Amino acid sequence: MPRFSIIVPVFRVQGFLEECLDSVLEQSFRDIEVIAVNDCSPDGCGEILDACAARDARVRVLHLPENVGLGRARNAGMPHATGDYLLFLDSDDTLTPGALRAMADRLQESADPDVLVFDYARTHWWGGTRRNVLAHLLAEDDAAFTAAERPQILDLLMVVWNKAYRRSFVEREGFAFPPGYYEDTPWTFPVMLSAGRIATLDRICLNYRQRRQGNILSTTSRKHFDIHEQYERVFAFVDSRPALAGWRPYLHTKMGEHCLDILAKPDRLPPSDKAEFFHRTAGMFRRYRPEGAVVPPELRVLEGGYPAYRVRRQAGRAARELGRRARRARTAAGGRLGRARSALGVRRPLDPELAVYSAFSHRGVLGDPAAIYHKARELAPHLRGVWVVRDEEQAALLPPDVEHVLLGSARYRRITERATYFVNNVNWPGTLVKRPGSVHIHTHQGTPLKYMGADLLDKPGARYGLDVPQMLRRADRWDYSLVANRHSELVWERAYPCHFTSLRTGSPRNDVLVNAGSGHGDRVRARLGVPAGHTVVLYAPTRRDHRRGGHVDRIDLARFAADLGPDHTLIVRLHPSLATGPARGLGLAELHRRGVLIDATDEPHVEDLMLASDVLLTDYSALMFDYAVLDRPLVIHADDWGTYTASRGAYFDLTAAPPGPVTRSHEELAGLFAAGAWREEGAARARSAFRDRFCEFDDGRAAERVVRTLMLGEPMAPPAAVPDASAAPAAGRDLLTSS
């Protein structure tokens, strides 16, 4: 008896079918059977299914003699299922890598509930990916529950394919799909209301394909009237189960919302049929209204006639249009007022003791700007430092003694009009005017491996949505560009052909790596819950600009964590730009919850993670250059180096001059750690050469050098590691090389 029986109804999807089947059959969890139901598809789907079954004994194909529709095709497959759990996968969708293993683990952990609800992501035909907006409902409780205990679980999309069903539960209750267009509705409500135990899995297990054409629910026809019959079935089911009578008010509201949603969508119903659809909906709404039930305000329109509904809809559209026009007018007026204020502001003198800071697009006190800010408070307490943050949510995360302004606010404009010093690791907004006498210090975000700035002009895929000329116009405001090594100095001066001065300071954010005491890493380990004596592997992959969303699973994290063994802890930190996207839902959050690894993506200070680790595993992240300061082992996993360099470009061949061992497959990576090769002498030699090249100015005094030289005007010696320092010009200017 397999763990999962995966039923795949198939009709006119020959362009997507192989991808769907491969996503199932290539899963690491293999205790499955696939029951593919060819719903008399007129294209080549039948042949594709037969060829797949010939290659893989886990696949069984049923060829139906006539087309019966999606629901009844699923019904045809169910009697042939022998697995513990049923999964229904639409044949144009795909499972994500590792999905079945995650489901199996969660089912075992939750003692085989009746239903397991998992997460999904919408994948658009043009390449975009968007996670289910109600994913937070799946992360609220580790224990199994009933719908009555957590009714909000019913707010999720009423579909069949985001759940695994215990087969014995389905057979006992006699659940089956009715014919029709909206067959998921009379399946999902009865199943969820009847389940004695429901569990959730906070992991994206399925990619829900958003097709450009061919989605049956986006087809304009009278078939959408089917929704009324399907809700009739739902109410009939509830009426047959007296214990479920309390759900009638909830279902009454859901039915009204669902039908009005269909009516409001422009691509569902022919215009000539909308009045009839409204009247049928209103009739059902009156007929099934529970005695004494209070109708929500948004559904009271169903108590009137269709003309009143149309008037309300038109009024709503008119109000929205007026709102849009008002916003445009306010924006235009604000622009005129802003220009007037700017003209007035530039007449006021600069404040020589005011410095403005920002980091990572106004995300908080982070990175190089944070290191400079803290050093300025120590060495130049008379300087007033103000941080720019993007919204109130970010402001709430700041320490209480940090002065801040919100981006775009009136106070932001007043501060930036008067400030003398501007410190940032990304470009300031184009609306910020650089005044004569102000000093703009650009820190960058690390040593460049991938192409940047003007070098992206020859990489159209990597600069998608990026206005390079605008970027360079903003970089024209830089006075100083901080560099940690001569490689960076040469790259920045080529990639940003602007009138700035390169400053050989080192990276201020790396000062803590040089100066941290021996107990710093131990304190971070304790805070993260790392067991004493464990070897800590920090995995920090970078984003992939050639993929929408930026994330590609390069490593099976659950498998790698198991390969490392019980005396290792795997810490994973995604690129900050991926922190709020679907990448977290592709298993990382669930593995963290189960204690398989530690998801440290939200840790604000990556330096803490570096100090807490014994070895860094990365692909092409600039973090490797910072980590080399610690002189600790590094491993490069370069399984897509050719693709990455072809799409983004690289300033040197990392695989030819790496900071440590290079692997190109999971097997190589697991073998490397199993054998301890990352600790060997050859790895140390490679790291030493890499460190000499890319950490030459990181002596632990970078932030001090910036503050003393640029803010206090004091002379200061260059980093001790700079070659030919004895031949440098007079102190105070010996850090500078004009671009």
Image (cartoon, rainbow, N blue to C red):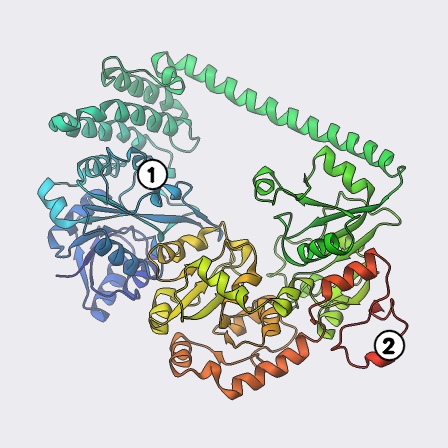
Q: In this rendering, is residue 183 above or below 685?
A: above
Give the residue type at disc 1.
Answer: Leu
Give me the C-alpha separation between circle 2 and circle 1.
Answer: 66 Å
Q: Residue furthest left?
A: 172
Please give left or right for residue 230 compared with residue 405 in the image. left
Q: Which mark is residue 220?
A: none
Which of labels 2 and 1 is toward the front?
Answer: 2
Figure quadrant of the C terminus:
bottom right
Figure quadrant of the N terminus:
bottom left
First in sequence: mark 2 or mark 1?
1
As rendered, which of 409 and 545 lies closer to the eye?
409
Give the residue type at disc 2.
Answer: Ala
**Residue 102 screen position, x and y as percent:** 30, 58
**Residue 225 screen position, x and y as percent:** 29, 28
Q: Secondary structure at mark 1?
A: loop
Q: Which residue is mark 2?
A: 728
Crowding at dot 2, Cα within 10 Å, few <14 / some 14-19 / many 20+, comes out as some
**Residue 526 screen position, x and y as percent:** 45, 61
Q: Secondary structure at mark 2?
A: loop
Residue sitting at 78 percent across and 42 percent down?
416
As rendered, which of 499 and 713 lies closer to the eye?
713
Do we see residue 162 in this rendering?
A: yes
Q: Which residue is mark 1?
A: 156
Please give left or right for residue 151 compared with residue 532 in the image. left
As rendered, which of 456 and 53 lies closer to the eye?
456
Do we see residue 477 in this rendering?
A: no
